[in-house]
Amino acid sequence: MARIGLERQSVLAAAAEIADAQGVEALSLAVLAQKLGIRSPSLYNHVNGLPGLRQQLVLYGFTLLKEALQRAAIGKAKDDAVRALAEAYLGFVRSHPGVYEATCRYPDMTDPEVQRAAGEVVEVVVQVLQAYGLKDDAAIHTVRGFRSLVHGFASIEQQGGFGIPLDLNVSFRLLVDTFLAGIHALQQAKK
């Protein structure tokens, strides 16, 4: 019997908790139903099976990431804004490792909703980088570079790939500063 007041947002929040605590592969309809105190078939009122749940988790993850990036960038410009975006991105991955993994592993990029949600994340970064006067292809290359930087670092960290006992936050800040130096070099080359 479905719990009174159960909404899609509650289902997604519970799914995110499971994915973040146990890994995205641990998320199943049975595990989610148990966490919510309902029977598995009741979930079909909210999601279209496990593939539908994963798709909704992807959308949920992109929304959370976009909101985190937007909050970080408010009131900041140029280097301060880029640093804030990078820190927010890494913070999101650290706080939501399973949800982030879902956004990397399960997005159906042919789905217009996923395209829109992913595009909104990219648009936040594009808006911040516009302050550097980068346009057209240069702007897209720079956005790709930013994503590669933050995703690569976060992914290696999640997998325990940094074994040398040095402060990871210092390494990350150095990496972001190096990226910013590259943006400044691009600007100088255009003059």
Image (cartoon, rainbow, N blue to C red):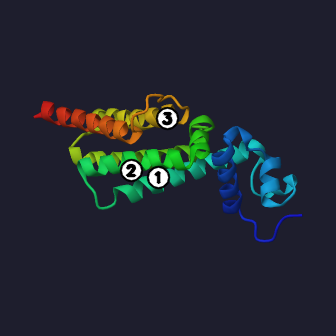
Q: Within 10 angstroms of label 3, few (less than 14), some, or many (20 or more) residues? A: some
Residue appearing at x 39%, y 50% in the figure: 124
Q: Which mark is residue 124?
A: 2
Q: What residue type is labelled 1?
A: Lys
Nearest the camera: 56 or 160? Answer: 160
* Secondary element at image label 2: helix
Q: Measuring from the top left, give residue 29's x and y in whole percent.
A: 80, 48
* Res 23 seen here: yes
Q: Within 10 angstroms of label 2, few (less than 14), some, or many (20 or more) residues? A: some
In front of the other: label 1 or label 3? Answer: 3
Q: Name the residue under label 3.
A: 157
* Res 116 seen here: no
Q: Residue 24's quadrant in the figure? A: top right
Q: Measuring from the top left, give residue 98's x and y in whole percent.
A: 62, 43
Q: What residue type is labelled 2?
A: Val
Residue appearing at x 63%, y 37% in the figure: 106
Q: Which amino acid does label 3 sit on?
A: Glu
